[in-house]
Image (tube, rainbow, N blue to C red):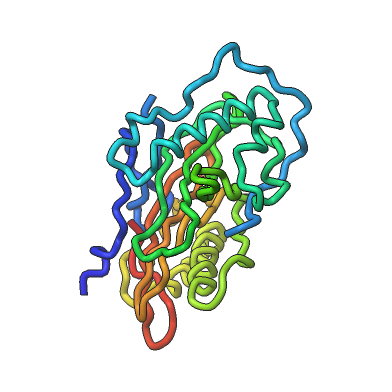
Amino acid sequence: MNIKRRIHQFTMPVIVLVAFGGAASGCGIPASAPTPNSGKQAVKPAIAAFEAPAEEQIYLKKEHYEGSIIKPQQIDLLNRLFNAQNAGDAQTYASLFTQEAPEKDKRIIFRVDKAERFDGFKSDSDQTEIDPVGGAIRENAADGYHSILYNFKQEAGEWRIAGIERANGTRIDESGYEEDELELAKLIQAKADAQNAGDAEAYRSLFIPGSIMGELHEDAPRIEELQIMKIDPPSTDTSIAQVAYRVEGDKQVRSNAFIFVRREGKWLLYDID
């Protein structure tokens, strides 16, 4: 069985890739622009004031997403959302959400200076109505990027935002998972915890025996931000999760595919791509 063939391929915008040095495997990639589970978003104090842009801005260009699983209408909706945020237009902002979206998500609590590397995370086997799209946002020019996930849903024949999930530091909110998916979320969290603690033995125990990927390098950087973008519904013995994260001293959000296998009833990490 070639497990890696199960990875869902997402067509991404034209981006600059730089080799990742944060994970023990050294196979992650940071993502930069073509120019961070319900309830997981970080809650920040309400922004006191916004400066409305002179004219509507294009934060995500549709031509960069041609051929991807992201719909052009979803790109348009995100651009409208970002413009409403930065103009402080609470009414327009709230109108872009579904009626059932959480009220806290309909309030403007952060702004978007830049938006980068947006991907679609809906798998072929996912029969839900939610269409997750995530990427990285920068709130201001002096700050770094944060991982963020927008859950799209059709309402009255139009795309709307059903909820927003933002990375909340290094902690994963496990309350949105159960059964096998919960075990996989715990593995992702344990990997970050062991890396941040420099605990090579604990790190190795999360991988299949003898895995080169399970060797924690002494210079592995600390994880400062962690978000699960998508966990594929596990099969009998395999699963894949798309994970976004940011490492210490880096302003860019990186992404990896975590590949899992079940051995003797226990989930273990097989590879990180």
Where's residue 3, x and y in %?
A: 26, 69
Does 42 appear above or below 116?
below
27 sits to left or right of 53: left
Where's residue 190, x and y in %?
A: 53, 67
Q: Nearer the viewer, residue 223 or 109?
A: 109
Where's residue 200, x and y in %?
A: 47, 66
User: Most extreme residue toward the bottom, as rendered?
Assistant: 264
Q: Nearer the viewer, residue 77 or 269?
A: 77
Q: Quadrant of the N terminus?
A: bottom left
Asked whether residue 15 is in view, the answer is: no
User: Most extreme residue toward the top, as rendered?
Assistant: 54
Asked whether residue 232 is in view, the answer is: yes
Residue 258 found in image quarter: bottom left
Residue drawn at 72 percent across, 47 percent down: 104
Q: Quadrant of the C terminus?
A: bottom left
Does 110 appear above or below 176?
above
Residue drawn at 47 percent across, 37 percent down: 252
